Every structure is written in C-alpha cells, then in structure tokens.
Amino acid sequence: MDVSPSFPVMISEVGPRDGLQSIKSVMPTQAKLRWISALAAAGLKEIEVGSFVPARLLPQMADIREVVAHALTIPGLHVAVLAPNLRGCRAAFESSVHKVTLPVSVTNEHSMANIRKSTGQMIEEVRQIVALRDGEFPGIAIEAGVSVAFGCTIAGAVSDDETIRMCAAMAECGVDEIGLSDTSGYANPTQVRRLFRRLQSEFGSKAGGAHFHNTRGQGLANVVAALEAGVKTIDSSQAGLGGCPYAPGATGNIVTEDLAFLLESMGHDTGIDIDALVAARSILSEALPGEALYGHVQDAGLPKGFKYADGRSPSAVQPDGCLKGVAQ
C-alpha cells in the first residue's frame, strides 16, 4: 500500500539521546535545554530528550531529570526517553514523560553487548516493566525499539522471521508500539518495505515507526521504502549525530534537516519550519566544538519556488531563492 502524497508524517527527533550518547563530548545542560527548545520551536512534535541510565556509563545523560523537567514545560511537545531496564523505567515513569522506548535486540549477541542481558532476560524485563506501568503509571506509552532488526554487525545476517518473533514477544508482553531499528546500517529498501508491511499485517495498531542509520548511505532510500509500506513516524537526528556505541561501525542517524526536506518535497506534511530547524544547528556548533555535523540542506538551501506540503513558503529566502544556511 503506497502512502498518499498528502499523508502527514511525524519526525521523531532523537538527537538529544541517540546523538549525544554516541559522542565523547558532554553537551552543557543549558545548551541542551536551548537546543530542545529550538527544535520544538521549529515544529518538531516529539523529541527523545535522553535516556535514564547510570551517569557512570553515559555521563552525557547525567542531567536527564533536569532535561525532562524542562521539556515537559514546552507546550505541545511529546516528551520521549529511552530506558534499558526496570530501574531506569521506574525513574522515567516517575518523571512523568509521555513515552518510554525500550531497546530490545533481535540477536542475543547485540543484547549482551548493549544492555548486558540475553534476549530471553530482556523479554522478561519488558514484561515486568509493562506490569509496573499498568499498575502505577497508567497513561505513559511504552515502545519496544527492536534493535538490529535488519542485520547485526556482531551476529551477522538477521532473517525477517527472527525479527518478527521478537516483535511477537513484545506484543505478548503488552507494549503499546513496536518500532524497527536499523541499528547497524544493514537495511536496504526492498527489505524495509517487506518487513514493515509484515509488521503492520501481523501487529496492526501496534506497528510503529522506523529508525534508520545512514552508515552505508541508504538512510533516505530506506525512508522512502518505509513510507511506501505505510510507516507514519520516522526517527532522525539533527546534523546526523548518533550511532550505536555497541554496534561497531554503526555511525550516524539520518539527518533531520534532510529528512524534513525529503518529506515536504514529496508532499508529506511534517509541520516543520526548515529555516528554523537549520538555525538550531548553531547551538550544536557552539556547544560541541570539533564534532562533525552532517547534512546537505543547510549548505544547498531550499530550491527556488519551494513550497511546504501545507502551502507555506520558506520564512527566510535569499535573492537566489535559496534558504540561507547557518555557517558551521
């Protein structure tokens, strides 16, 4: 089933979590708060603002409670976090976030490297997390982010059946949503289209979004395939920051700025102001000196005559008709 050109798509920004956890620099808290505010002001409706993990393991996330408290004050923002275990989820639930994503690996090898639990142990952990939510924190959504769903740098090839079996286990545990993550940058468009169609066929309303890494340059091609399969939520990271530190070579998420342009140019309404989104990159440049920032839209600008899917014109246009970029 192809998606109508006018079908709205939500971009879920994961830079403050997936992006920052993968670099050595620690972004100052005040800069992080300004960044999240700028992303929300640019029209992003969901931001994964961090993860509830021990600061000794990820010092980049030591300020997660302050970050969540700030994000919750932003009107209309859906505040998401990642938590890898029951303890982290309790802290996340207590902070009143809107959604918690659980990283659940298809392969045992990645699961042990990523969260130090076997896949079987993680399934039992998810069951306990859902029970905790149901009993004490109703209303908070739980997403299973199924990692290495398309292939694993540690274990190798991953079959569709292996991925779907883990999805079935998550559905049985009672999660609200099941997303597929190309943690290692293995996915290709044919595989993406096939697996998401199967996910939707077998799990209906629980079938969730797509999380692609651009490790081998296939990120946006995989987005188009996901759209053709009916996927309505796509994760991305501003400036392409990110990559799983426990999947060797899995560099970089897809770039939010480039994704927003792709979707809008295809007629998918994202509600994002690309001009304001590009401007938010300056916060990264200042707060993370020396870190590589990726993407093309900020350099090339928007094409002359560009219109957003909802009919808007760009808010800042140069005489040649291009969006003014932000120097890096």
Image (cartoon, grey):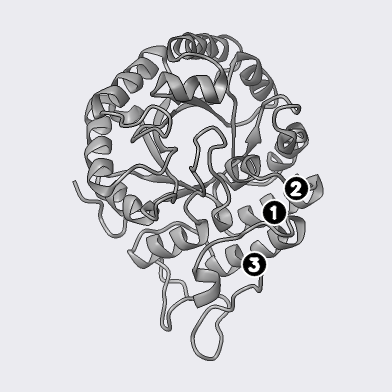
Kindly identify the residue that appears in the image at 41 percent across and 13 percent down. 173
Amino acid on which disc 3 is placed: Ala
131 over 327 or under it: above or below:
above
Q: Is residue 84 visible?
A: yes
Considering depth in this image, is 92 or 21 the residue closer to the camera? 21
Kindly identify the residue that appears in the image at 43 percent across and 10 percent down. 120
- Tag 2 near tag 1, CB within 8 Å: yes
Secondary structure found at label 1: helix
**Which circle marks residue 178 in the picture?**
none
Residue 39 picture location, percent across and down? 62, 55
Kindly identify the residue that appears in the image at 36 percent across and 13 percent down. 172
Q: How many marks?
A: 3
Residue 161 picture location, percent across and down? 24, 24
Mark 2 and mark 3: Cα distance apart in space: 18 Å
**Which circle marks residue 27 in the picture?**
2
Mark 3 and mark 1: Cα distance apart in space: 10 Å
Mark 2 or mark 3, which has the lower sequence index? 2
Secondary structure found at label 2: loop
Q: Residues within 10 Å of mark 3 (few under 14, many from 20)?
A: some
Residue 121 picture location, percent across and down? 48, 9
Amino acid on which disc 1 is placed: Trp
**Which circle marks residue 279 in the picture?**
3
The residue singled out by tag 1 in the image is: 35
237 over 274 or under it: above or below:
above
Secondary structure found at label 3: helix
Considering depth in this image, is 209 or 24 the residue closer to the camera? 24
Q: Is residue 314 visible?
A: no
Mark 2 and mark 1: Cα distance apart in space: 10 Å
Amino acid on which disc 2 is placed: Met
Mark 2 or mark 1, which has the lower sequence index? 2
